[in-house]
Amino acid sequence: MTRLALMTAFAALLLPQTAPAPQTQGPGLFRGGVEVVELDVSVTRGGAAVQGLTAADFALSDSGVAQEITSVSLERLPLSVILALDTSQSVSGDRLTQLVQAGEGLVSALHAGDRASLVTFSHAVNLRVPLTGDMNTIRAALPRMTGGGATSLRDAVHLALEMRPADQSRPLLLLFTDGHDTASWLTEDATIESAHRAGVVIHVVRVEGDPFLDRLVAATGGRTWAAGSGRQLRELFTKALDEMRARYLLSYTPRGVSRTGWHEVKVKLKSGGADVTARQGYFVSESSPPR
């Protein structure tokens, strides 16, 4: 993607937000006029995924109103992984080498039918590889990364979210950063708003703590992994991918709630102790289905 194209994309962010065009597939669907909301939900106990759950095990509310879950599955749909990697000045030398190896390990762990894309960010955001099923393209691009410049973290997140596919694959944004944002045009609130609208799970592998990243992960129902050293990156990238595959896909048709606006969603188990993680909700404009 050229610098001009990126500048055009970010200039559009300064205009009043409008809802994305309706999709025929994705987290919120129209099927024969019936609205369906789909949520990726992580259920873990002691750090291990809990298996064998059914709709009867979950309680879900939409805008404070209890909803009937129509289906629960450990979905085996292909993944669309958007890999967004920090290549600022602090990512150089051994750490850059370890980051390349981590990306190669993630690509090797993808299944037939999965797709991936590569975004890098420093003072500029670059789309290195658009979403593709040709993993050799990703493998070839990873070693070409170089470290240098400031960190446009928020701008990179927004661009990556705009790349989400409009199909039935399950989108995952896997974000790596070793520092804090120092160069973005976008504010934290604008980026969180983009995440709310996108319906994409965001997993973060980070070196330093950052309250913004905590907000981002909470908004999208993702998780964070702390890397004590660059040697852990490959293991953590693979863990993030495995966690996504172990998630349940919950579906329901909203009843008794306003159709438009922000819908806060809460999911829990009816009994038994476990950690349940899902995105905070979805946004519906007058012209679009739920997301």
Image (cartoon, rainbow, N blue to C red):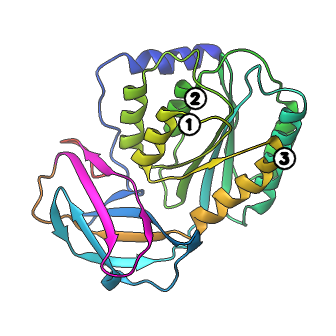
Residue matched to label 2: 156
Which image quadrant is residue 184 in? Answer: top right
Residue matched to label 3: 231
Circle 3 SS class = helix
Q: What is the three-letter code of the residue carrying label 1?
A: Ala
First in sequence: mark 3 vs mark 1 = 1
Q: What is the three-letter code of the residue carrying label 2?
A: Ala
The disc at residue 240 is none
Circle 2 SS class = helix
Q: Is residue 183 above or below residue 43?
A: above
First in sequence: mark 2 vs mark 3 = 2
What span is in magenta? Answer: 260-284
Q: Main secondary structure of the magenta part?
A: strand
From where the camera sits, is residue 210 visible?
Answer: yes
Q: Is residue 280 above or below residue 147?
A: below
Which image quadrant is residue 78 in? Answer: bottom right
Residue matched to label 1: 160
- Contact flag, marks 2 and 1 (Cβ < 8 Å): yes
